[in-house]
Image: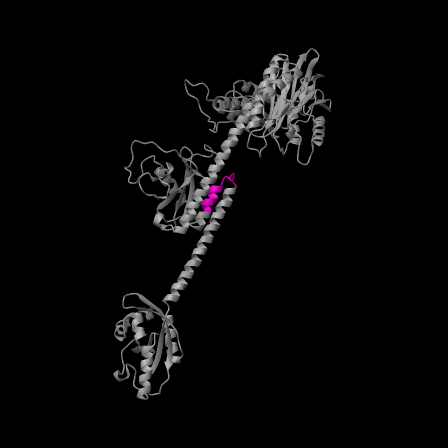
Amino acid sequence: MVVNSHADPMSGGLPASGPSGTLDLHARALAATVVPMGLFESRDAVLTAVWVNDAFERAVGYGLEGAHEREPTIRTELARDPVRAMQLAEALLARQPFSPTFELDRGDGTRFVCQVHLSPVPGADDEPEYWVAAFQDMTEQLSHDAEQAALVEAERRERRSLGLIAQVSDLLMDVDDPHALREIAMVLRHAVVGWAGFFLNDRGLRAADGIDGGPGRGHRGDAFRTATRGPRPDAPDVVQLLLDGERDRPVDLALDAVYACGSASEWLAQHVSADAQHPTDGQPAPSGGRAVVFPVPGRRRVLGLMAVVPRDEGGLRAIEPATMTILELTARRVGLVLDNARLYDREHRLAETLQRAMLPEQAEVDGLDVWTYYAPNSENVQVGGDWYDVLQISPDVAGVVIGDVVGHDVEAAAAMGQLRSVVRSYTFDITTPGPVLERVDQLVTGMRIPRSAGLVLSTLTRREQGWRLEWSRAGHLPVLHVRDGVATELRDAGGALIGFGNGVRSTSTLDLVEGDVLVYYTDGLIERRDRGLREGLAALAGVASRITARDAAGIGEELLSRLADHPEDDVAVVVVRVPDPRDHLERARSPRRRRWSLPNEPSSIGRARHAVVRTCQAWEIPDAANAELVVSELVANAVLHGFGHVSLQLYDTGDGLRIEVEDGNPAPPVSTDGHPGRVGGFGMQIVERLADWGWRQSRGGKLVWAKVRPGSLPEVGR
């Protein structure tokens, strides 16, 4: 649009035409309107302004002279928009109304956005071609449109943020997923940042793919180095400030800066640089040289860090407010779930340790084959009230106790611990079960133990003809006696719960013969929601009468596999078998799994070797010497270097014997060459020579496994 000032001064700026009165009225009317207007002359498809009204001058801040001064700018803008220039030329040639949108410079330097409504003015053939233009101010409309667009964009960002947080929450629901944190980092990378990763602070930073159940688990990253020399740092250790809780807001971390040697910032910058430049998801590596580090807060301390590399340069300043909200909420949510998971795991391990500390370890009774088992309900984190005890009262007298205190809490466990101590003390003093329970009744009444409890107390006395069983029951399920495939419930000598006796407790006796089996159990072995107590007892008797295993461990394992595959309560089982000299002459199917719980003491090494030898005999595995030596080394390591209970499990895999030993120390086993002045150091070398072995972390510490290769011991020198 070309503007010019060609006007007749006698007509108020309009060309002279027609009666002067009418023309003067038209001129005054157009000049008085509040709508910015102008008259343009068209020559060679170029518009030249010949008149503008006062409203136009008020809208833009200048008149014809000012418009003329801006003529080059308007020409330049049209040249940059050839499509609009062509549309304007076509409209002028066809003399059709046209409404283009223009941005004109105001006198104060701002932009006047307007829609120009151009219409041709009819005239004689010999007159120049004129166009009248009305300028509609679009500033308010555009502001409203921009505001609406901003609201729509804000809502879209909010929905995206809520969607991302929902995805993060869904991923955090499965705390046992070993790759939960990696998947969250991938979600963030695909949505809002160029790269993301999580690092947990477990006595030093380590990269983390998942939420661990507690500190000390998983693969530990490189430890911070300690050095006396190194380049002079040019950046503070901002990462350590986050870990120490001195800063609670995200910080910038320049990946190419020089940090103090061995500092947390140096370690993190190196790992972020390496991981961000070599992504594993097929996405391009981010170009930014700065990472933004967010603290992952727990209740009492910073549990770790979340590091992100923005898609654009600039670090913290390059992150939009909406993205910052997403990242901060993600870090806080991860910290909350991580803290809860560790608290749950710590309480669970504490409860399990307390429960096991109150139970005796695997017992060895001279002349009897004894196997014990206890497992808390997996859905119940707290301790329970089930317990058992196996006592070697004298060389010829053994005691077996099994009981159940009502409840699954600390109070039940405390009551169980008190009862166990009382029964154990009185049994060593009085070996007849009935009188022992009478004294327990008297003491419990005085102690006011708040929970009711039932138990079975029995003693086994060695005689010339075999063993004699004496027992008394206090509100507990009867012991099951199995002889020659016939299962019988020992219901005699029953009585009320402990503390509710009438002062007299009876004792029943039974002479045992070689091959007899006694099964002591709590109700968790037989009761189910869909099966009553009577049906459970019948099922137990049916399974026990058909068992062909000829050792206590095999009998117990078969009972568990048939009856306790999905227990709904705590389960405690004690199996006692009178050995039969004919056992080695008779072939019998035997369950291919054994487990023992051993105390953390040197005597467990010999007991473990004895257990392996008996198991190999039951399973008819030749050349048990290899397995005996391997289990000896594994249990010795658990006793010497571990802590807590020691669990031994044996499996027949079909092509060899698999040995698993678990202890409470999460540190991995190490195979060393030993050195002068040190005793040992060669145990795992012996295991390596006789078996394939490995280890993994478990809920209670670590589990070391070894699969013994069949055959005899290797020859010396080979």
Q: What colour scheme has been applied to the protein in the rendered image?
A: one colour
Q: Is residue 707 shown to the viewer in this render?
A: no
Instruction: Classify 210 as above or below 286.
Output: above
| Residue 180 lies in the magenta-colored region | yes
Residue 269 is situated, as x and y percent measured from the top left of the image, at 36, 41
Nearer the observer, 411 or 102: 411
For the point 62% across and 18% down, the residue is: 442
Residue 510 is situated, as x and y percent measured from the top left of the image, at 71, 17
Please count the marks in the image.
0
Task: Please give the range of residues in magenta.
Answer: 174-186
For the point 47% across and 49% down, the residue is: 164
Nearer the observer, 683 or 196: 196
Instruction: Classify 443 as above or below 271.
Output: above
Instruction: Classify 423 as above or below 10.
Output: above
| Residue 39 lies in the magenta-colored region | no
Indicate left or right for 267 with 498 as reference: left
Nearer the observer, 709 or 477: 477
Q: Is residue 109 shown to the viewer in this render?
A: yes
Residue 489 is situated, as x and y percent measured from the top left of the image, at 72, 24
Nearer the observer, 701 or 61: 61
